[in-house]
Amino acid sequence: MIVLLFLVYLAIIAFEVPRLIKKKQWRDLIAFSVFMALAVAISLPLALGVKLPNPTKLIAAVFGPLSERVLGVKPKI
């Protein structure tokens, strides 16, 4: 499964990166690289069966106090 995952990512990179370099779209290449690295970092543990934490709790912890101040309501999670 992991080998297949890497083959898919390599195929996407081989298809996208040369075109971005040829057109000299450096910002797009950087954004593509960042998002591709995030995708690999998330999908690899999932493929290995590692349970990842739910990001909703982190978002609620960060923005919960802000919503309390602005709206006067606690977020329901």
Image (cartoon, helix red, strand yellow):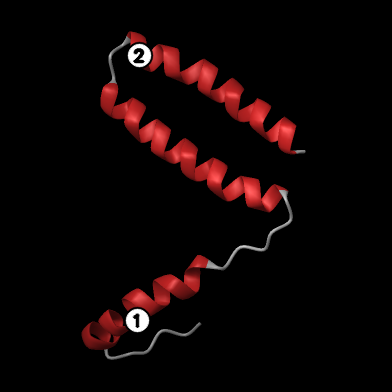
Nearer mark to the viewer, of 1 and 2: 2
Q: Secondary structure at mark 2?
A: helix
**Crowd band around label 2 with a 10 angstrom C-alpha radius: few (<14), some (14–19), many (20+):** few
Q: Residue at x 57, y 50 (%)?
A: 42
Q: For mark 1, what is the residue? A: 64
Q: Nearer the viewer, residue 31 or 41?
A: 41
Identify the amino acid type marked 2: Ile
Which mark is on residue 29? none
Report whether 68 appears left or right of 45.
left
Report x, y in % for residue 12.
56, 24
Q: For mark 2, what is the residue? A: 21
Report x, y in % for residue 67.
29, 81
Identify the amino acid type marked 1: Gly
Q: Nearer the viewer, residue 73 or 59?
A: 59
Report whether 28 appears left or right of 9.
left
Whether label 1 touches label 2, CB < 8 Å: no
* CA distance separating discs 1 and 2: 42 Å
Seen as rendered, the residue at the extreme top is 22
Report whether 41 appears left or right of 58.
right
Report x, y in % for residue 68.
29, 87
Q: Nearer the viewer, residue 39 or 65?
A: 39
Q: Is residue 50 above or below residue 35?
A: below
Q: Residue at x 48, y 75 (%)?
A: 57
Mark before the other along the chain sequence, 1 or 2: 2
Q: Secondary structure at mark 1?
A: helix
Q: Is residue 64 above or below residue 54?
A: below
Locate the N terminus by quadrant. top right
